Amino acid sequence: QSVLTQPPSVSAAPGQKVIISCSGSGSNIGNNYVSWYQQVPGTAPKLLIYDNNKRPSGIPDRFSGSKSDTSATLGITGLQSGDEADYYCGTWDSSLGACVFGGGTKLTV
Amino acid sequence: QLQLQESGPGLVKPSETLSLTCSVSGDSIRNNNYYWGWIRQPPGNGLEWIGDIFFAGNTNYNPSLKSRVTLSIDTSKNQFSLKLRSVTAADTAVYYCARRMVGASKFFQHWGQGTLVTVSS
C-alpha cells in the first residue's frame, strides 16, 4: 500500500485534458514539495514536474502541477497518443524520513 | 550530460546478497548539490525508494529496508553501490540509480536505464 494515493487509471480522448490526483497527509505532501514522473513501459521514469509546479527544461507547457494542502494534481492538456504512460507522484515524508511515491496512474489516450 | 549506468548480476539466489553499482559520468559524484540514490520497481508494480547517499557518506534509508541495505560511495571511481542482504523473491525488481537534489527539493531529475534483478534458485 503506497503512502500517496493515486487513481489506478484515467483516460481521455486525443486533444482533451486530463487531471491526475495524488493524495497524502500533513507529513508528506502537506509540508514538502511534490514531483511528478512519466514512465513509458520498459523505460526509466522521467521527471515532468518538480517543486509542485515547475517544469524542467524540455518539458512542454501542456504539463502542469499544483498543490493544495495534502493533495497535488498533474494536468495534461492537448493529449497526444505519446502521452500514454504511467504517471507517479513523489515527495518526502517527514515522519518516515523517506522519499515516497504514489502507486501510479495509467493514462490511456 | 549526466549519465548513470547500473551494473551487477541479473540473478541472485534467495538468502544471498544483491550487489549493484552505479557508474556516474558527466558530473562529479563529489557535487555537494546532490544525493545519489536507488529506487526499485517490482514487475508490474510501482516505484519504491531504497535510499540515498551523499559524497561525504551521509545516508538515508527506507525504514522498511534499512535492516538489510547498505549504500556506499567511491569518489575515486565516481561510483556508488547498493548491497541488499538476505534477498527473497519479493526483492525481484528493476533497480534504478538516480540523482536527487539536496535540500527541500527532493526530486529525482536523472535516472539510469535500470537493471532487472531476479531472485531465484
Image: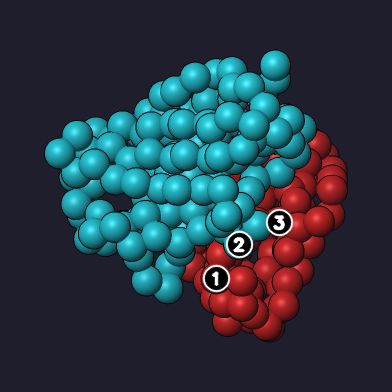
Chain colours: A red, B cyan
* Residue in view at x 33 percent, y 41 percent: B80
Q: Mark 3 lies on which chain?
A: A
Q: Mark 2 points at which residue?
A: B63
Percent x, y of residue B83? 47, 39
Image quadrant of residue B7? top left
Earlier-in-chain disc, 3 versus 1:
1
- Judge left or right: residue B24 versus residue A36: left
Q: Nearer the viewer, residue B35 or B113?
A: B35
The disc placed on residue A102 is: 3
Q: Can residue B111 be seen in this view?
A: no
Look at the numbered disc 1 and give the secondary structure of its residue: loop
Percent x, y of residue A57? 38, 49
Q: Do the residues labelled 1 and 2 touch (CB within 8 Å)?
A: yes
Q: Nearer the viewer, mark 3 or mark 2?
A: 2
Image quadrant of residue B42? top right
Q: Mark 1 lies on which chain?
A: A
Q: Can residue B64 be seen in this view?
A: yes
* Residue occupying the far left of the picture: B76
- Judge left or right: residue A49 versus residue A12: left
Q: Do the residues labelled 3 and 2 touch (CB within 8 Å)?
A: no
Q: Name the residue under label 1.
A: A97
The quadrant of the rendering that contains the N terminus of chain A is bottom right
- Judge left or right: residue A25 versus residue B97: right
Q: What residue type is labelled 1?
A: Gly
Q: Which amino acid does label 3 sit on?
A: Gly
Look at the numbered disc 2 and give the secondary structure of its residue: loop
Mark-to-mark CA distance, 1 and 2: 8 Å
The quadrant of the rendering that contains the C terminus of chain A is top right
Q: Which amino acid does label 2 sit on?
A: Pro
